[in-house]
Image: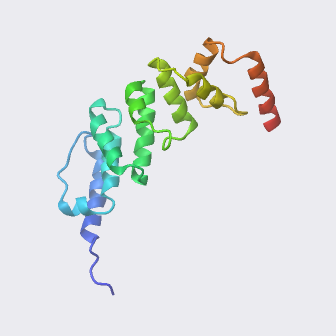
Amino acid sequence: DGGPDPLADGRQQFVAAYEDVKTAPPGAVPADSDVLRAYPLYPYLLAARLERRIDDPAAAPSIRAFLDSQLDQPVARSLRNRWLMALALGKRWEDYLSIYRPDIDDSVAARCNAYAARVALDRTDGLAVAVLAEWNVPKSLPPACDPAVEWLLARGQITPELTERRARAALAAG
């Protein structure tokens, strides 16, 4: 017997607080005890609370501060992905580009949303090369890539020869 569980009280408070996230108003800021704040999974509670506010522009500073404090921790991954998606859907491109990090946000959709943001904000220096590299693969791209590909098409960057080469590569890849 190892004696009493030193985390039992924190665990109990965490479970109750985590359940409260589902029913509490999204902007509610409960007074968490020192025991709860010291509980190892406390950052997951904070992330869940912030996720409820993901569509609220007023929550942006809190979300950004949380992501900065958690850096590359697993707890930040889901919140970061959902926030980027919400920012892209809301076409909040300045915010999107201010938190987008290619080393962390490495999905095709995240990259393409960054390209769309750059197009929308007219920050297109060097963009054609990146978008062409993304487009020139033998598979379909997610809808997030459409604005950047349309931008390339409008500038004549996707030639019939490139289109044929991509189509042949796609056929060869099955």
Q: What residue is rendered at 20% in x and 45% in y? A: 29
- Residues 73 and 2: in front is 73
Coordinates of residue 72 in the picture (x, y in percent): 42, 50
Name the outermost residue toward the front: 126
Q: What residue is rendered at 63% in x and 31% in y? A: 134
- Residues 34 and 102: in front is 102
Q: Is residue 47 visible?
A: yes
Q: Quadrant of the C terminus?
A: top right
The answer to which image quadrant residue 141 occupies is top right
Coordinates of residue 25 in the picture (x, y in percent): 25, 40
Horizontal arrangement in the rendering, residue 173 relative to residue 34 (left or right): right
Q: What residue is rendered at 38% in x and 32% in y? A: 98
The answer to which image quadrant residue 54 occupies is top left
| Relative to 56, residue 10 above or below | below
Q: What residue is rendered at 50% in x and 29% in y? A: 113
Coordinates of residue 136 in the picture (x, y in percent): 69, 29
- Residues 64 and 10: in front is 64
- Residues 130 and 164: in front is 130
Q: Quadrant of the N terminus?
A: bottom left
